Amino acid sequence: MLAYVLLIICAVMWGSNITLGRAMHGDIPPIALAFWRNFFALIAVGLMARNHWSQIWPAMRPHLSLFLVGGVIGVGVFNALLYSAVHTTTAVNASLVMSLTPVLVPILAFFMLGQNFSMRQGIGVAVSFFGIGVMLTRADFSVLSRFDFRPGDLIMLGAVAAWSLYSVYVKKRPDAMHPLAFLTAMLCVAVLALAPAYLWESLTRGPMPLTVEAFGSAAYMGLFPTAFALTLFNRAVDSVGPSTAGHFQHLVPVFAALLGILFLGEVLQLYHGIGAVFIAAGIYCATSSANTK
């Protein structure tokens, strides 16, 4: 039960990331936002893991490929792709593509970890995805035929693949490595990987504006949707596995919509409630399947 509560808290934080991203994406370049988000997260997690610094390199050395793939792709590339995508696609398209994550995670977990993927989990994914569709299409599925896929839509597919890969790789954490030390290593690799891209972006597109709003937004994203959320997410994955944890990704657009209503002046509609019911039913179906094994 605690793991599910943690996953819901993560969904709230990640939903707030989308809401804040909508408000700031026109002011902060995407690579800059990804770099500073992970930089602030590294500082926070590194301080929490200070008693475990001595084990980071000895535990990393035999598993460098794990940390390179997880840190570069699962953390660094994911953030860069996510913030790049919203510059060239609509929020509706990006959210719909991102909701494919719970579909991809169990498939990757099956091939990489040998975890079973039951029919009931598949039904749960389908029901949740239907709920996402209701909410994002405003209960008018005819809009699907009018979607104009832009470069950002394809970029979001890459972001989905990167995050799904990270969700599975968390389960491969070395047993001798503390979760906070593991996350510190992942974030350190991500920051180092993003640094050259951030420098290139600053030279070609201009640096991030030196404003309280810009750095305050990046700091919030680094502390809450990254440092705290990933710490809770890693703990939950250790308990329930990546497939079950991945289903809670469906809650992220729900909370993003609710936060948008509260802070961006968006209006609550009936389709929001209908979609939330289907999403909750799908998560229950998928997670209850995992609990009965």
Image (cartoon, helix red, strand yellow):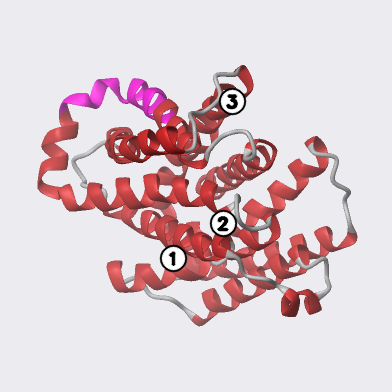
Q: Amino acid at mark 3?
A: Ala
Q: Amino acid at mark 1?
A: Val
The crowd level at tag 3 (other Cα within 10 Å; few <14, some 14-19, many 20+) is some
Q: Main secondary structure of the magenta part?
A: helix
Left-right relation of 63 to 33: left
Q: Secondary structure at mark 3?
A: helix
Name which quarter of the figure residue 54 lies in.
Answer: top left
Which residue is painted at 89% across and 56% down in the image?
269
Mark 3 or mark 2, which is nearer the start of the sequence?
A: 3
Q: Which residue is mark 3?
A: 214
User: Gap in Å between the C-alphas at discs 2 and 1?
Assistant: 10 Å
**Magenta stretch encompasses residue 42:** yes
Q: Which disc is residue 33 wearing?
A: none
Name which quarter of the figure residue 134 lies in.
Answer: bottom right
Q: Which residue is mark 1?
A: 105
Q: Secondary structure at mark 1?
A: helix
Which residue is painted at 27% across and 36% down in the image?
185
Rendering coords of residue 196 (x, y %): 31, 37
Q: Amino acid at mark 2?
A: Gln
Q: Which residue is mark 2?
A: 249
Rendering coords of residue 262 (x, y %): 81, 38
Point out the frontmost of discs 2 and 3.
3
Q: Which residues are magenta?
A: 41-54
Rendering coords of residue 105 (x, y %): 44, 65
Cβ–Cβ under 8 Å for marks 3 and 1: no
Which residue is painted at 83% across and 70% down in the image?
139
Rendering coords of residue 68 (x, y %): 24, 48
Which residue is painted at 43% across and 51% down in the image?
78
Mark 1 or mark 2, which is nearer the start of the sequence?
A: 1
The crowd level at tag 1 (other Cα within 10 Å; few <14, some 14-19, many 20+) is many
Vertical comparison of 113 with 35: above or below:
below
User: Gap in Å between the C-alphas at discs 3 and 1?
Assistant: 32 Å
